Structure formats: structure tokens, C-alpha cells
Amino acid sequence: MMRLIVVLFAPVALIGLAPAAPVPKHLMPKEPLYHAVQKGTRWVYTDNGMDCEFEATDVKPLARGGWTVTVECVRDGAKSPYQKIEVSPRGLVVIEARGISAENPLCLLQRPAEPNAEWSYRRDNPGATYSRGAMMVTGTEDVKVPAGVFRAVRVVHEVTVVWNDKPIQQLRVTTWYAPDVGLVKATGEGYKSELKSFTPGKG
């Protein structure tokens, strides 16, 4: 998964060449957004054999660049809070889950990042439990799911669930995020969620 690219230069070929001019900022490639930011966007996932539908019901610009996207769960025509996520070239950060603001916002994807980029986190759960762990970008690859084939960034989560300051469970979860879409696949022990359909919004 991790790739090492070695570029060999022939010294003779470089003799007499003038230094290259810097590339203007407006011509530099832009870091893509790894989540849709259009109101009305819909995602349907097949989650361990069950379909789950979500909709972006609100999108607001951030003063520092990027957007806050409100995503709600859609079930039997009714909508309920799922999460608010900050989407920017810096990555994806969950700031609210199930209608409750996160004391410690959870970074799902840190960008721009090279393979092996790693960051840690802690997330408090109801009661005396919390989760702690680390996430690592391990590369980019083509991912085939029911909705199609997506070029996606792969992130590995090493999670420890702690109760009364004692580790009670360790998990390994892998997620894949595609530009302008968001999460396309997630797997763990006995768990698999895949994007079944994706409908971009018009807002």
C-alpha cells in the first residue's frame, strides 16, 4: 500500500540548465475537497446488508475557507440529525454528532498529507467510556463499491475503547474518502459499509 517513488537524475543532463521559474500560485494544483458541499446531496450506503440514506440539508461557508455541511439521516421520509462536518482543503473534521456538539472535534482526514501521515484523537462517549487512537493515511487507490469505482484516500484507524480508565476493546477500522463525494467505504471486524448510490445536490 505504501509506495516509495525514487526519481533518478542524470547529472550530465542538468549541466548548463538555468533554475526553473517558480510556478504562479494560480497555476498550482488545488487540494481537492474530500466531501460534497452542495445542499441536497444524497448518499445511500449498504451497511451490513441494510440501506442507510443521508442528505446534506445545509451548507454554510467558513470564514477561514471551506464549508460546514449538515448531514441528516433520512428514514421513512423523516430526517434526524447525523453530523456536522467541516470540509476544507485541510481535510474533514466532525464538529457535531447526533445533534450534540463535539467537545473534541474529530479529524477524519487530514490534508494535504503524504502516505504515513498520522494524527491522534480522543472522543468522549456517554457514561464513563471514551475512545482514543490514531489515524494514518496509507495511500490512494481505486475502490470498487456498488455506486462505482472511486479513486480514494485510504485511512487506517487504530482505536482503543476505554472504560473507567481501563482499555476494554481494541479495533482496527479502515475508511476510504473520494474527492467531491466523501466516505465511499468503511470496514472493520465484522463490519462493512459501502456507498450504494450518490446523487450530487444542485445547491
Image (cartoon, rainbow, N blue to C red):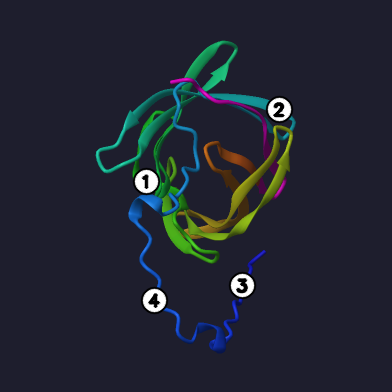
Compare marks 4 and 3 and give the one earlier in the sequence. 3
| Distance between mark 2 and mark 1 Cα atoms | 28 Å
Residue type, mark 4 in image: Pro
Secondary structure at badge 1 equals strand
Q: In this rendering, does residue 128 appear at all?
A: no
**Residue matched to label 2:** 50
Amino acid bearing label 1: Pro
Question: Which quadrant is the N terminus positioned in?
Answer: bottom right
Q: Which mark is first along the chain, 2 or 4?
A: 4
Question: Which residue is label 3 attached to?
Answer: 5
Q: Which mark is residue 105?
A: 1
The crowd level at tag 3 (other Cα within 10 Å; few <14, some 14-19, many 20+) is few
In the image, 79 versus 181, the foreground residue is 181
Per the rendered image, the range of residues in magenta is 187-203
Q: Earlier in the sequence, mark 3 or mark 1?
A: 3
Q: Which residue is mark 4?
A: 19
Contact, mark 1 vs mark 4 (Cβ under 8 Å): no
